[in-house]
């Protein structure tokens, strides 16, 4: 019987570049910026890293198809390197590769890197990729805002919300993320906004306005992972352990027939249930101290609160407006600004989420540090990536927590 990876792997160090319009940098510069921070944090030399995974999504636009750009930029010691891509879950997929290698005993110290350089393409949104059979046959005219706008309409229809009422809850989510990002020096957007500004913002795809949408950014983030035994040997005292790392991918049911009503994601509850079981989380509403979720749009964050089991079905708008997910709420969400404001360099996003949880658990988050339920700092944090769109996606859920002494 499988035993899972709980407490078999710890994070020795993490790093994250500043996200934003990094016109002065190429992807190699961004990787070096994140890597140097992680290396210093882990207190190791690069020659101690035995394997590495690179997560990049839009390869032609920036980094390339192989893992060699990482190996060359970081001057890694001729170790095995692998490039991975799994839509917007790419950063977590890189982490999964490194974590699984250490858990399996294939190596003792591994690196996970995620990077994306999007602003130099000249596009306001994501650049066009060369499409293949999947997009041409199934989604020839789909856009991300259009797909998630349909999620909002389906959710409102299922639970009987008027669109103005739903939009007020969505606006609160955007305001919260902007407020949180003002405390984050590495965030792309650090300006405060009002709910009225969100409600009156330029329409993108009804009911989504421009301030309901995350932008795109340049950035990189990385993690160095190892075993608890090696961490102790390195002299690392307080360490963050990987409690769970689960992934669920669509199998086509959502696109195939009407068993799915479009108001939720099918994959997120599956990945979350597996992660809770692996981590031994019995009651996530009481045990999870903070969360980073895939808030590509404000409606996505709202729906995910239910998909993750943190709000009752149909009640998320009430919980959002009651402040349950605010900085001082029961389960703070996007304390670093999230995709909305920290930014969304796709290959780096999953690792950026882990970076924030890591800092919070170790009490290193500076001005944005949370106290946690006990008042002594958070004990468990959750990250969630949603790669793709509501009717075909990849959901990845990880849970991090301090390793027991």
Image: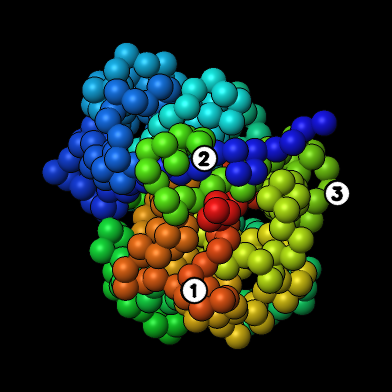
Q: What is the basis of the colouring in this image? A: rainbow
Residue at image x 21%, y 47%? Answer: 22
Instruction: Establish if 190 lies above or below 282.
Output: below
Q: Is residue 237 visible?
A: yes
Instruction: Establish if 114 lies above or below 334.
Output: above
Q: Mark 1 points at which residue?
A: 376
Left or right of 36? Residue 320 is right
Q: Mark 3 points at which residue?
A: 259
Q: Whole-Å distance between the Cαs marked 1 and 2?
A: 23 Å
Query: Residue 10, how many percent across, how many down?
Result: 50, 42
Q: Whole-Å distance between the Cαs marked 2 and 3?
A: 45 Å
Q: Which of marks 2 and 3 is nearer the N terminus?
A: 2
Instruction: Establish if 109 lies above or below 79.
Output: below
At mark 3, the secondary structure is: loop
Query: Residue 63, how many percent across, how many down?
Result: 31, 28
Q: Name the residue under label 2.
A: 228
Closer to us: mark 1 or mark 3?
1
Residue at image x 31%, y 60%? Answer: 187
Left or right of 59? Residue 133 is right
Q: Whole-Å distance between the Cαs marked 1 and 3?
A: 45 Å
Residue closer to the observer: 100 or 128: 100
Locate residue 100: give its quadrant.
Answer: top right
Query: Residue 118, how many percent across, how many down?
Result: 31, 41
Locate residue 68: give its quadrant.
Answer: top left
Residue at image x 82%, y 31%? Answer: 1
């Amino acid at each position: 019987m499988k035993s899972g990876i709980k407490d078999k792997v710890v994070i020795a160090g993490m790093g994250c570049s500043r996200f934003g319009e990094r016109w002065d940098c190429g992807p190699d510069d961004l990787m070096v910026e994140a890597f140097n921070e992680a290396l210093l944090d882990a207190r190791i030399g690069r020659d101690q890293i035995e394997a590495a995974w690179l997560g990049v999504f839009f390869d032609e636009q920036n980094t390339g198809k192989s893992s060699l750009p990482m190996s060359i930029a970081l001057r890694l010691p001729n170790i095995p390197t692998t490039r991975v891509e799994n839509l917007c879950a790419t950063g977590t997929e890189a982490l999964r590769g490194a974590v699984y290698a250490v858990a399996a005993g294939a190596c003792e110290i591994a690196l996970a890197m995620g990077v994306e350089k999007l602003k130099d393409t000249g596009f306001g949104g994501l650049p066009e990729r060369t499409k293949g059979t999947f997009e041409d046959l199934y989604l020839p005219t789909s856009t991300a805002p259009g797909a998630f706008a349909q999620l909002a309409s389906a959710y409102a229809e299922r639970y009987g919300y008027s669109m103005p009422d739903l939009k007020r809850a969505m606006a609160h989510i955007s305001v919260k993320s902007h407020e949180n990002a003002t405390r984050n020096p590495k965030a792309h957007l650090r300006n405060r906004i009002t709910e009225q500004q969100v409600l009156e913002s330029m329409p993108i795809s009804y009911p989504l306005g421009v301030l309901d949408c995350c932008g795109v950014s340049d950035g990189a983030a990385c993690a160095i992972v190892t075993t608890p035994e090696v961490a102790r040997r390195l002299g690392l005292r307080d360490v963050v352990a990987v409690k769970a790392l689960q992934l669920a991918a669509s199998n086509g049911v959502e696109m195939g027939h009407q068993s799915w009503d479009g108001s939720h994601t099918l994959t997120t509850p599956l990945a979350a249930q597996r992660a809770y079981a692996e981590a031994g989380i019995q009651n996530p509403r009481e045990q999870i101290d903070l969360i980073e979720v895939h808030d590509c749009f404000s409606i996505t964050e709202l729906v995910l609160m239910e998909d993750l089991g943190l709000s009752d079905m149909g009640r998320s708008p009430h919980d959002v407006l009651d402040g349950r997910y605010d900085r001082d709420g029961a389960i703070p969400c996007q304390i670093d600004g999230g995709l909305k404001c920290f930014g969304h360099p796709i290959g780096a996003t999953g690792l950026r989420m882990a970076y924030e949880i890591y800092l919070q658990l170790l009490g290193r988050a500076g001005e944005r540090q949370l106290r946690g339920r006990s008042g002594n700092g958070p004990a468990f944090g959750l990250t969630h990536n949603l790669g793709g769109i509501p009717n075909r996606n990849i959901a990845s859920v990880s849970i991090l927590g301090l390793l027991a002494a």
